[in-house]
């Protein structure tokens, strides 16, 4: 959507809640307010100067009251059913019941508890974790932050290091390309043969995830982007003692980090890396969220 089209698209009749998140939600809320919508925010870091056009709610219920659209953060939900944020917010049925009739929740990924609570209230959930365009737009900031994690936790250079990237989704692909550009000797572990072939075209080696334990002794750094338990004890035990293990995936994660640490290896769960550039990433997320809201409103008008 062009800037001219965005300028013409106004939603003064819309009540929108931004609940949970981090500094990215500051930018999302600010841009949402530019549509003319009534925007309330809660559960993310609030700047001292406030956010132009956005009301600071006193609680999650206050933010969600009569809201037609609620924006929850992109990271996967915690095991206790809470969403990512500065406050512990569990979006149970009672909390969601204060929203407007036939409301919508827009977020990265919901869990079964939230889906059941929403379904019982006729609230629709729009999940965008699988939105490839949106994920690619935020990938550069995540990869930059991953490089920072590597640099701060190793005593070797990325150049000429033997690095394994587990998974070749949106983030894994951009990460692989960047590490190769920096001179890393990259091996991609992926179940999908097409993904391994794509890694080959970028100059990386390719192995099946089933062969990860066998090849583990060769890696200085292992980065997992897959939210499934692939980097288990069998893999970790075969990594060099000096290896760095980084889990870039959403909960429940893809690395047995506690076990890795218990063996003396350095292990980092690098969550919410989009915070490295919250204005850039927040704007890219809003570009996708805005399209979702526009579609919702168009469908409502049609019916």
Image (spheres, rainbow, N blue to C red):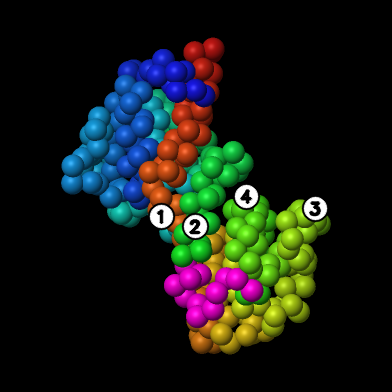
Q: Earlier in the sequence, mark 2 or mark 3?
A: 2
Question: Which span of residues is magenta-colored?
Answer: 149-160
Q: CA distance from mark 4 to mark 1?
A: 18 Å
Q: CA distance from mark 2 to mark 3?
A: 26 Å
Name the residue tied to disc 2: 144
Name the residue tied to disc 4: 170
Magenta stretch: dominant secondary structure = loop
The quadrant where residue 202 appears: bottom right
Image position, residue 25 (x, y; %): 36, 43
* Residue drawn at 58 percent across, 80 percent down: 243
Q: Which mark is residue 194?
A: 3
Q: Are marks 1 and 2 in contact (CB under 8 Å)?
A: yes
Position of residue 85 relative to residue 290, above or below, is below
Q: Are marks 4 and 1 in contact (CB under 8 Å)?
A: no
Name the residue tied to disc 1: 276
Q: What is the crowding at mark 1: few (fewer than 14 residues within 10 Å), some, or many (at least 20)? A: some
- Judge left or right: residue 68 versus residue 65: right
Q: Nearer the viewer, mark 2 or mark 3?
A: 2
Q: Tell me if residue 147 can be seen.
A: yes
Q: Earlier in the sequence, mark 1 or mark 2?
A: 2
């Amino acid at each position: 959507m062009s800037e001219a089209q965005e300028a013409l698209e106004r939603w003064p009749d819309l009540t929108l809640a931004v609940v949970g998140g981090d500094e990215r939600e500051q930018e999302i809320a600010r841009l949402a307010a530019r549509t003319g919508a009534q925007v309330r925010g809660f559960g993310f870091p609030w700047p001292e100067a406030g956010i132009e056009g956005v009301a600071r709610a006193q609680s999650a219920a206050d933010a969600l009251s009569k809201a037609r659209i609620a924006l929850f953060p992109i990271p996967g939900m915690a095991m206790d059913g809470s969403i990512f944020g500065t406050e512990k917010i569990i979006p149970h049925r009672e909390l969601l019941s204060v929203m407007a009739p036939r409301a919508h929740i827009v977020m990265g990924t919901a869990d079964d508890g939230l889906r059941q609570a929403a379904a019982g209230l006729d609230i629709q959930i729009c999940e965008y974790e699988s939105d490839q365009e949106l994920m690619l737009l935020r990938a550069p900031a995540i990869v930059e932050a991953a490089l920072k994690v590597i640099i701060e936790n190793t005593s070797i250079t990325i150049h000429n290091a033997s690095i394994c990237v587990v998974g070749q989704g949106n983030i894994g692909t951009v990460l692989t390309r960047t590490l190769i550009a920096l001179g890393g000797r990259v091996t991609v572990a992926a179940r999908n043969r097409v993904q391994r072939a794509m890694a080959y075209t970028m100059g990386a080696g390719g192995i099946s995830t089933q062969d990860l334990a066998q090849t583990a002794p060769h890696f200085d750094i292992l980065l997992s982007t897959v939210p499934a338990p692939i980097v288990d004890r069998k893999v970790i035990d075969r990594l060099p003692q000096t290896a760095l293990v980084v889990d870039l995936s959403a909960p429940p994660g893809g690395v047995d980090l506690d076990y890795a640490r218990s063996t003396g290896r350095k292990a980092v769960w690098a969550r919410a890396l989009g915070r490295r550039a919250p204005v850039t990433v927040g704007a890219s997320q809003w570009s996708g969220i805005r399209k979702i809201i526009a579609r919702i409103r168009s469908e409502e008008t049609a019916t």
